[in-house]
């Protein structure tokens, strides 16, 4: 039978999408034309901050001194895990070469981009983990310059723990500026910074729109929407754990979808009873987001069997996918569309968000059907090269000349002709495109 929605969302992540394009484009145009001064005007308007923009070494040390030692150790632990995983990823970026035909050698090189701009949110929540995820990965990739950018709080500046994390993870410069103006400053190379070749990191809709508009002039990790999470659970799952995990992700934002997909009606019904109680027990600032997300965006879907559950999950292509079900190896082999996968009750999305080592900058809004999350590969350019002997060039030149003429590209054909005449002056070649 068709899947049954025990709870259906009244809204989607695109339901309340506002047209921010013109606002963001105007800000970018003004800053590009006005440079540092224009960026400072927007910083005063939106950040309400008039302190140092590019933090000095002394300011970084002063911020670090405010971070409790226990939190420092936690940051260093998370950094070590993310670094270890990123280093393992980098080992897959190998330079290779192959002799295509005798005398023709082609190869691949992995070259890190020169400058990475890492945006670290700092509004409602101080995203310390985003500093760890973005800066560490850029550092392991081998980026020469890493700029960390985070919005300051009025009269305070950047959260000291974010400053500490950015420095520990390898940021060369730390920029106290938020929103579109921060993204613009990294892109245009303001305040003496090198121009970014790639922008990474999460942000609000204005940051996301700025990255979308600038894509092409710079690389970006992805165009991100509200964070989303899906849990696959069968009769072996613990309803309290499932409910807690749903609530934990719903607190991200009022429009952050969470989905439960199960083949067990009793589990679904118990989870639906537990979630509102767990939300009510949250602190007020978290409760507001989670209440709206559960009310308007959450879904509970009942399926007949695990294959149907997997199909539903792949269709949703969630950013975060948790499996709390029997036979985890089956799910690992079967599931194909997700940003990051959490297998078993013993791991949870929050582990990946904060400290376990895999990156938390992940595709949202179904983008996991075609892309993965942030990794060292995002900071690497995979480029190719080739060289040939004259004998090796011969068959390639003949084929190139004929294909080019068939396409009507005579100039291309003649670049092959001239080499054949030069290298093999005594020979005659049939280089026409006639069959």
Image: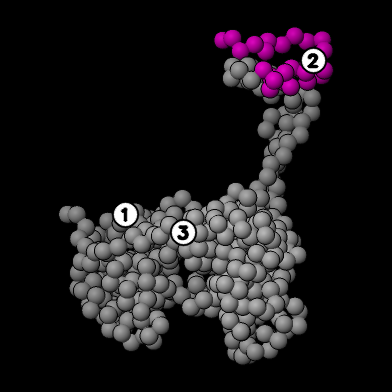
Tell me how many marks there are. Answer: 3
Give the residue number, with chain letter if any, for mark 3: 20
The reply to whether the magenta stretch includes residue 429 is yes
Give the residue number, with chain letter if any, for mark 2: 421
The reply to whether the magenta stretch includes residue 303 is no
Foreground disc of the pair 3, 1: 3
Give the residue number, with chain letter if any, for mark 1: 311
Q: Residues within 10 Å of mark 1 (few under 14, many from 20)?
A: some
Q: Are marks 2 and 3 in contact (CB under 8 Å)?
A: no
Q: Quadrant of residue 391?
A: top right
Between 411 and 89, the one lying in front of the other is 411
Q: Secondary structure at mark 3?
A: loop
Please identify the quadrant where the C terminus is shown.
top right
- Work out how far the residue at label 3 is from the one at label 1, CA to CA, in angstroms: 34 Å
Q: Residue at x 42, y 52 (%)?
A: 369
Q: Secondary structure at mark 1?
A: helix
Q: Position of residue 379 (x, y in %)?
A: 64, 57
Q: Residues within 10 Å of mark 2 (few under 14, many from 20)?
A: few
Q: Residue at x 19, y 69 (%)?
A: 265
Does residue 343 sit above or below 125 in this rendering? Answer: above
* Magenta stretch, residue numbers: 410-435
Between 142 and 32, the one lying in front of the other is 32
Please identify the quadrant where the N terminus is shown.
bottom left
Q: Position of residue 271 (x, y in %)?
A: 26, 76
Asked if residue 335 can be seen in this view, the reply is no
Between 377 and 20, the one lying in front of the other is 20
Q: Secondary structure at mark 2?
A: helix
Q: Residue at x 20, y 66 (%)?
A: 6
Foreground disc of the pair 2, 3: 3
Q: What is the residue that sits farthest to the left in this orientation? A: 1
């Amino acid at each position: 039978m068709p899947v049954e929605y025990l709870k259906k969302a009244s809204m989607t992540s695109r339901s309340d999408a506002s047209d921010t394009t013109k606002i963001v484009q105007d800000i970018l145009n003004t800053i590009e034309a006005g440079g540092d001064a224009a960026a400072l005007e927007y910083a005063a308007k939106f950040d309400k901050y008039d302190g140092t923009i590019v933090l000095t070494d002394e300011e970084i040390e002063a911020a670090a001194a405010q971070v409790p030692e226990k939190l420092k150790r936690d940051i260093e632990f998370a950094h070590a895990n993310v670094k270890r995983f990123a280093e393992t990823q980098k080992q897959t970026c190998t330079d290779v070469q192959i002799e295509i035909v005798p005398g023709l050698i082609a190869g691949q090189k992995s070259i890190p981009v020169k400058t990475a701009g890492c945006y670290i949110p700092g509004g409602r929540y101080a995203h310390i983990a985003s500093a760890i995820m973005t800066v560490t990965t850029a550092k392991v990739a081998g980026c020469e310059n890493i700029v960390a950018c985070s919005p300051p709080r009025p009269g305070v500046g950047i959260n000291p723990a974010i400053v500490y994390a950015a420095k520990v993870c390898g940021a060369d410069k730390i920029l106290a500026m938020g929103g579109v103006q921060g993204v613009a400053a990294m892109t245009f190379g303001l305040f003496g910074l090198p121009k970014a070749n790639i922008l990474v990191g999460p942000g609000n809709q204005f940051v996301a729109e700025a990255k979308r508009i600038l894509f092409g002039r710079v690389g970006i990790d992805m165009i991100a929407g509200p964070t989303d999470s899906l849990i696959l659970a069968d009769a072996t799952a613990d309803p309290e754990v499932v409910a807690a995990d749903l609530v934990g992700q719903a607190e991200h934002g009022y429009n952050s979808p969470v989905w439960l997909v199960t083949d067990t009606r009793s589990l679904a019904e118990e989870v639906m009873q537990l979630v509102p109680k767990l939300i009510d027990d949250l602190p007020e600032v978290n409760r507001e987001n989670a209440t709206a997300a559960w009310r308007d965006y959450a879904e509970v879907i009942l399926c007949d069997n695990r294959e149907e559950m997997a199909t539903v999950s792949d269709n949703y292509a969630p950013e975060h996918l948790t499996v709390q079900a029997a036979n985890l190896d089956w799910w690992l082999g079967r599931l194909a569309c997700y940003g990051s996968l959490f297998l078993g009750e013993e791991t949870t999305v929050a582990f990946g968000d904060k400290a376990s080592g895999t990156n938390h900058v992940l595709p949202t809004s179904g983008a996991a059907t075609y892309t993965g999350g942030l990794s060292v590969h995002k900071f690497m350019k995979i480029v190719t090269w080739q060289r040939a002997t004259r004998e090796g060039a011969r068959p390639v030149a003949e084929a190139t000349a004929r294909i080019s003429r068939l396409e009507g590209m005579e100039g291309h054909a003649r670049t092959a002709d001239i080499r054949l005449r030069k290298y093999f002056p005594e020979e005659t070649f049939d280089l026409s495109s006639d069959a």
